[in-house]
Amino acid sequence: MIIFTSVCANYVHKARTLAQSVKRNIPDATMVLCLVEREISNAIPNECFDHIVLAKDAWEGNFDRFIFKHSIVEASTAVKGQFFRYLMDRFTEEDKFVYLDPDTYVYSDFVELREMLDQYPIVLCPHLLKPGNIDMELSSTAHGVYNLGFLGIKRSDEGRKCVDWWAERLYLFCYDDIQRGIFTDQKWFDLVPSFFDAKIFKHHGYDFAPWSLMNCNITRDDGGYYIEGDPLRFIHFSGFGASAENCMDKWLPEEGQLFRELYAKYAAEHNQNDADHISKTPWSYANYYSGEEVKREVREAYRENYDVMFLYDDPFAKSNKIYQELLGVESNGKIKKPSKWKRRLQKARVILASKGICGLAKAFVQWIKR
């Protein structure tokens, strides 16, 4: 079994904590870190991971042009589909591939998941397994029915079709843009049970999270922890810190002290893994090569303008000034629609860059004839 997570450097401490829990509880698993940075820092200890792979080295096509579109919040999710493909192509002897968010923690072997992946090509978990928490029901309609902090894929034609479809959608649309019906990589999976042979895995011990705390039943015996009688396999400590603690205060019953104990133990290990303050590491794709920070409004305008997007092979070699002029981004962040002649000039630049002077001359002749 291959287990991987995807992070920028500021989440490496979370990935370390996850990897340590995997090593303790699933020793036969191969743990892979996908790192969305320009280089692998010496501060990342190899002993936590069997393999560390830069996202750009697993990419097909122009990675700089792709990642320039994304904020740091979007980046580590935008590469997940392609990284599944990379792992399936690289580890040809493996037939089970599992993604876990870096803020998850494994408590026991994935016994049921192994069996599921023997039978089904795609295994996914819903955010909610029972009605009653209206806040989280509304959140699921906005953010996605299924939580993509976990995903299991079996090597199969159907599994590969799903991964290929998802990777292509993420290449075009992996943004934190709920108003347009997109929430990074996750919202796409609302369609997966309709498109593919997917197993919706309703086991309380997988992907247990702060959103599951209302009316939960956590117990413990010598064999470990149980949620609603199901053995606990992993907790997704989503929103670790103020958000998760707010969920505990709102929804955790008085008898829920066991979860608070688990949370405290996770917090101690999580914080120890950040003793070197790696969480403070700046994102290497946050700036142009000059050191100038890429403005959010430039990234957002860039992703909508394919002519400008394909004008330069390496957008990080340019500047905000260049892109603000090309994209019509004003100093207040608003997009000014360019004039007809400016749009034609932009188009000419794209043709010149991609097809040369002969291609530009041919396009000009065709335009004159219209």
Image: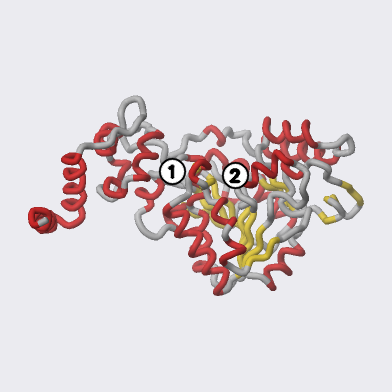
Please say if the residues under marks 2 and 1 sit with CB atoms less than 8 Å apart: no
Q: Amino acid at mark 2?
A: Ala
User: Percent from the top left, x then y, of residue 176?
Assistant: 50, 42
Of residues 173 and 194, the one drawn nearer to the viewer in this rendering = 194
Residue in view at x 66 percent, y 63 percent: 123
Q: Nearer the viewer, mark 2 or mark 1?
A: 2
Of residues 82 and 369, the one drawn nearer to the viewer in this rendering = 369
Residue in view at x 75 percent, y 52 percent: 129
* Quarter of the image where one finds residue 211: top right
Left or right position of 69 against 43: left
Residue in view at x 73 percent, y 32 percent: 245
Badge number at residue 70? 1
Colour convention: secondary structure
Kindly give the residue lying farthest to the top in the view shown.
332
* Quarter of the image where one finds residue 112: bottom right
Question: Spatial distance from mark 2 to mark 1, Cα to Cα?
Answer: 20 Å
Q: Which residue is mark 2?
A: 142
* Label 2: few (<14), some (14–19) or many (≥20) C-alpha neighbours in 10 Å: some
User: Percent from the top left, x then y, of residue 238?
Assistant: 66, 41
